[in-house]
Image (cartoon, coloured by chain):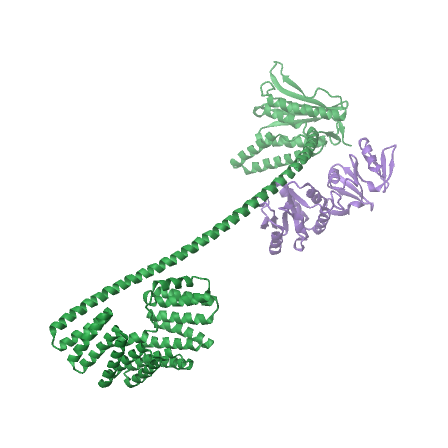
Amino acid sequence: MIKAIIVDDDKSCINTLEKLLSKYCPHVLILGTANTIAEAIDLIERKKPELIFLDVELNGEFGFDLLKHPSAIDLNVIFTTAHEKYALKAIKSSCLEYLLKPVDHNELKAAIAKFEGQMHLANNQKKIEVLLSNIVAPDNSFNKIIIPGHDSHIFLNTSEIICCEADMNYTNVFTEKGEKIVSTKNLKEFEETLDPKTFFRCHKSWLININFIKKFLKSDSQVLMSNDMLIDISVRKKDEFLNLFKKF
Amino acid sequence: MKHCLFLVSCFLFLVSNGQDKRTVDSLYTVSNGTNDTSKVNALNELSLLFCETDNQKALELAIRSCDVSKKIKDEKFLAFALNRLGSVYDYKNMPDSAYFFYNEALKRFEKLKNISGVAAVYQNIGVLYFIQEDFDQALNYYKKALELRIQTKEEKYISKLYNNIGVVLRRQKKYNEAIDYYEAALEMKLQRNDKLGVAASYQNLAMAYEYKNDVPKAEEYFNKAIALYTELNDYADLSSVYSGFADLKTYMKDYKKAGEYAELAIEYATKSELPDRMFSAYEISWTIDTLNNNYPVALRKLYAARAIRNKIFRNEKMKDVEKLKMIYETDKKDNEILLLNIENETKNRQRIYLVIIIVSVTLLFLTALFFYQRTRNANLLLSRQKKEIEDKTVQLQLQAEEIAKHRSQMNPHFIFNALNSLQGLILNNEPEISITHLNSLSKLMRQTLNNSESEWISLSSEIDYLNNYIDFELQRFDSKFDFIVKLDSEVDPENTGIAPMLIQPLIENCLKHAGLNSRENAKIKLEIKKTGNKLRISVEDNGFGRKSTNSDHQSRATGILNKRIAEVNKKLGTESSAGLKFVDLKDNQGNPVGTRCEFEIGIFELF
């Protein structure tokens, strides 16, 4: 049994989610609902839920702000959002769960299952920290990222990443410390999450951090990274790549 | 009968019958004036005048007098006014209220150390007790008043008080003491040579001695009084004295003399023309005639008395009428004053209205001027802004055109039809299917939005999108058809970019116009081949063919598509080909077995 609350400024959204939960995830018990952050804090303090369904945009309030409150700091959260692109990016960067409205019941079931599977992982607070740090970062320049692996999450500063390699639907992340982290996210998602001013998609299979480029090999159209990896620059991307350095 | 004589003399100082209309008018004028002190005086006087005729009016006036005194904060006037109020209540026969106000007046006079005032109030309180027949208290207050009047040496009041005390004592049957006071009064009147007063004292003394059974003394004083009144030609009082004398003679059983005096009383009463007097004279006279056994005369006098009584009654009626008349007059005056006030107020109001109108008009004018100025400025600004907007609009239009070149929106028809079928599902109470349907639609719309933001999307994204679209449509029509994608092995779907929403309209076309819904083994085949530096994209169905369906919408849709294909090819520097090409498929017998639509587009490599 999961004790949960729903925070949403739209009462019909609350109603729909409640109905969906009772139909598809009947073991999720809704202890109460709130329309504002203040109401939500009150509800959390009184009912002590394990999980919050939190709308990102609460009628002028920012749903994330709830997570800054001491009572909510180590609560598990599943965001619900309609079309907030920027917020979605930040959520993705922190590996927190989210549901798009209208909520697909299959995705809902998956999210609940995932929550149940990860309840033992006490890294929620860290995720929220990443989220809150990224949400205030100016356009896409996220400083932190959480990389979802098969059985764990790895917290990284984006400045530690040297490059990312596509590996079928997975991604290999190479770090400054010489690690190779296998992420379950595909390269496209990394490209969307990481700051495009720093990370450059030089190839179908490669995303590189331009701060770690040691050398550009003109003849072979390759770059040498600081960890001595040689990475191809595709023909079509060559001009764009060179333009990046024109300003230097 | 005897009592009334004394009472008259005893209240004389309080009662004023001179309700002369002119006096009332002048007092009214003063009482409505602006001088507050004279106003209070006038009000007090008026109140006194009205005591007998219109008690209510007297009360109102006394109260007004109090108010004005309070307004001007003059304690002395207030004390007088309160004293007046007390006597008004006295007349109204409300002794408790009278006593209260007398006391209030007394307190103030005492505080002001106004001895005359205190004495006047004591005197009034004495009268109040006298009327209530509390003779001890009456005596007490009269004596107090007397003490103060002696202190201030107001002889006029002293003699009156002696007289009053005498009356009280006589009522208490203390005849000797009464005589003492009457004599004291007499002495003072003699000193002042107040002949009328002296005569009245003689009369009082005569009565007192009569009560005392001292007949010689009584006779002596009656004679003295007669002599003095005769000297003064005071017929009324002469009549009264003779009546008293006749009474005395009757008491002495000297009926003959009594009869004579009674005749004289009648004679003088007739001369005085006072009906009251005449009546009492006749009354005494016919009683004495009866005692003289002179019945015919007695009867005649009885009739006369009755006639006079009737006359008195009539006179009283007349008096009442007079009173009413006066009340009417004063009310009229009041109303006139009220009207005048109203008129003044109206004039004032008119003046205020005039001022308001002038101010309003001025304000209106200023406001209008302000707005005119502002509008003029605003117009100048507007025309400048308008030009800027026009310039911007031109720019924006150019930009919009640019954007529209690259992007295609989902057909609104499609969205609303989808919503419509959702509505049907909900109405049919099929929540499971509705939800699935809704999820597909939302996914599709999200994908459309995302894709339309990019100039290029990967072929794999486009195919994914098309699959979702087909899924959605399959759910919607609850039909079965196969969607076959044949991708040339040379084409890398991840690295090949395509402008979004180029293929979807063709598939929608097939679904709409090929009549696939009612067909067994219906299928749509998408084929993507690489030919040189171009992609050949073809969409083929096995429906009824183009001819049998409406082609109007189709041509418009294809028009837009042709335009976009041309633009993309131009941008990529690809040799522009013919654009969309429709091929009607036929079987061996020449029957339509479907349509194929194909176009060629330049290859854009993403990486």
- Farthest residue toward the front? B231
**Image vertical order of residue B502 relative to residue B267, above or below:** above
Residue at 20 percent across and 78 percent down: it is B246
Q: Answer yes or no: is residue B561 visible.
A: yes
Chain shaded purple: A
Quadrant of the rendered image containing residue A140? top right
**Image vertical order of residue A128 relative to residue A219, above or below:** below
Question: Which sits in the foreground, B236 or B172?
Answer: B236
Q: Answer yes or no: is residue B97 visible.
A: no
Instruction: Give percent across and percent down for residue B207.
Output: 25, 81
Instruction: Give percent across and percent down for residue A210.
Output: 82, 40
Q: Quadrant of the C terminus of chain A?
A: top right
Instruction: Give percent across and percent down for residue A213.
Output: 85, 40
In screen coordinates, is A22 left or right of B233? right
Question: Which sits in the foreground, B325 or B264?
Answer: B264
**Image vertical order of residue A108 relative to residue B478, above or below:** below
In screen coordinates, is B163 left or right of B312? right
Instruction: Give percent across and percent down for residue A92.
Output: 70, 43
Chain B in the picture: what colour? green
Residue at 43 percent across and 65 percent down: it is B39
